[in-house]
Structures are given as structure tokens and as C-alpha cells.
Amino acid sequence: MEPMIRSAPPESVSGLTPPPATRPLAVQHTLHHAISCVGTGLHTGACITLTLQPAPAGHGIVFKRSDLNAALLPARFDYVVDTRLSTVLGDVNNPTNRIATVEHLMAALNGCGIDNVLVLVNGPEIPVFDGSAADFVFLMDCAGRVAQDAVRHRIDVLRTVRVEQNGAFVELSPAPVQNLHLALSIDFPAEAIGKQTFSTELTPATFRSELARNRTFTLRHEIEALHKAGLARGGSLDNAIVVDGDQILNPSGLRCPDEFIRHKVMDAVGDLYLAGAPLRARFTGHRSGHCLNNKVLRALFADPSAWRYVPAHASFSRVAA
């Protein structure tokens, strides 16, 4: 589903084409102006309005339910309250104040190098659009990106942290590269998915060309159970890949042969941005998902010797509770 743009775009809109690199990502960035869109919630099926607003340097990514008189929800690992079907931010003192399915938007913010934005949403989840991050990238290109007079901070991983669960694992380890390097593998019994692996170094160019357009997926036999649980009410072949054994039920097929693992990597890009700043690390995993992605961040920050904040003199208040 295409977003409905409610503000005037800048003079040039690049869609998914990387804008010219005019300066290094050494300073913080926000949006040039606010932009709104309307889409369907994957689980509620509700029509939801999403607005992205520019924010000052040091603000970080912060979510707010515009339909509630409730507290702000910083985009941080320690505000994650559920990871069963998506990454859900919430207020433990107010169960009503929660926003689900933030991972695709967070991936786009990470991939586009946006540090500061206020996300307003008038419902309990982020619109799903086509099930990928492409429409969120389009929104940010329409809003424009502006540099701010503040140093961009990052988090360096200094020693390996690993979490495991039921044969799946993820780990963060020191990386020789300057950015986040991701390497994941999956293994599904459905023949249409099977075993897949993918690795990449996260940059604005690789995010747009390798990750942004890859859609979420589900198995056909799981859909009935989701419906009985009152979930996936907004799901359709327009916003998810549906797999039935060796068949892809979407008439248009896949966007690339390994779209499944690429989507998993894109999810990880979003989940890991909940560190509160870009990570300089190597992220490795097998059969991972939102739960382990969140657990590895909690394990990392529980060990002060495993990470450092760069620049070292900067405050860590954005990611430490």
C-alpha cells in the first residue's frame, strides 16, 4: 500500500535511489520537515495515521501515541515489552500505551542515517504498507534530510556477547569495519524458503539496494491461528509473502530469490537501532528474530566492559535507563 503524502516534498525526490554523498555521516541528522501518511495496521486492520516530525540534536528517536494522553516512548531496547510477532515499545506502567511493529520504520531510520525524529501514531501499531521498509524510505526522501550542529555518536562493541534459545543464536562482536556488519542464516522446513544466508555491511547505499524492499513473510498454516488470536486482521498478499510448502501464493512472486533472509536482516537493522545510537559491531545469527535481537542488546548493555560510547565524553543518557 502506497503512503498518502500530506506535505509538500522538497524539490527533488530520490525514492530508493541513494542521494549524492555530499558529506560524511559524522554529524547528527533529522528531517527537513514533517510528513504524514495513512496506512493499515497489520494486526488490527485499522486505518492508522503516521507522522514523522523533525527533532533537535540529542533528541533521539521517540514515539508518541497521538490518540492517547500518555508518556513518550523512546526507541530503546529497554522500552521493548513484547517481541512475539513484532517489536513492541510500551510503558510498563500503562499497558495501553504501546506501539507495535516498529522494526521496519526503525530499519529505515537506521539505514537512512536519521538520528532525531518524533514519531506520532494514532493507534497501537505502525502501518505495514507493503511489508517492507521501502515506503518509509520514500517518506524520508520526501521530507528531506538535514544535518545538525552536533556530533553523531556511536556504540562500539568491545567483546563478544552471545544469546541462545532453542537452537537459535545471535551474537555481537567487535568489528574491523566502521559500520554495522550483519551475517544471518535461516532454515525453514517449507521448501519455498529452506536454508538461506546473507551478509552485508550497513551503509545508506547497501540498505537501499539490498534490504529496504524485502517484505515480511508468513506460512499459510499459521494464518488461521493468528486470526483466531485476533491478529493479522490487516494482513494480505499486498503486505506479506505467504508460503505454502513449495509455493509462493503471491501472484507477483518474490522480489529476489533470497527475499526471506534479506527481510530478516532488515528486521535486525531496525531492532539493533534500539541501542539508541548506531552500532559499530559484527552481528551474527542463526534462526534469530525480534526476541533474540532484543536479548542481545540487553546482554550487551548489562556488561559495561563489552561496549563504549564514542565520543567517550558524550552523555549516555539516551540509551541507559
Image (spheres, rainbow, N blue to C red):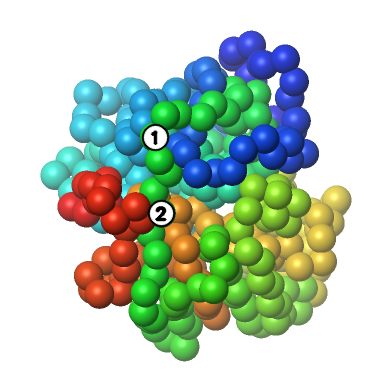
- Up/down of 91 relative to 81, above or below: above
Disc 2 marks a residue whose amino acid type is Arg
Q: Residue 126: where, in percent of width, then height?
A: 48, 38
Q: Residue at x 66, y 71 (%)?
A: 199
Residue 125's quadrant in the figure? Answer: top left
Q: Is residue 186 left or right of residue 63?
A: right
- Up/down of 226 relative to 244, above or below: above
Label 2, secondary structure: give it.
strand
Per the image, the residue denoted by label 1 is: 150
- Between 109 and 5, which is closer to the camera in this rendering? 109
Mark 2 crowdedness (10 Å alpha carbons): few <14, some 14-19, many ≥20: some
Q: Residue 309: where, in percent of width, then height?
A: 32, 58
Per the image, the residue denoted by label 2 is: 154
- Between 6 and 95, which is closer to the camera in this rendering? 6
Disc 1 marks a residue whose amino acid type is Ala
- Up/down of 305 relative to 123, above or below: below
Q: Residue at x 37, y 74 (%)?
A: 158
Mark 1 crowdedness (10 Å alpha carbons): few <14, some 14-19, many ≥20: few
Q: Is residue 82 left or right of residue 192?
A: left
Quadrant where the N terminus sits is top right
Q: Residue furthest bottom?
A: 167
Q: Residue 54: where, in percent of width, then height?
A: 44, 24
**Residue 243 shows up from this direction:** yes
Q: Residue at x 45, y 75 (%)?
A: 174
- Up/down of 253 relative to 167, above or below: above
Q: Is residue 133 left or right of residue 159?
A: right
Q: Do the numbered discs 2 and 1 sit on residues whose CB atoms are within 8 Å?
A: no
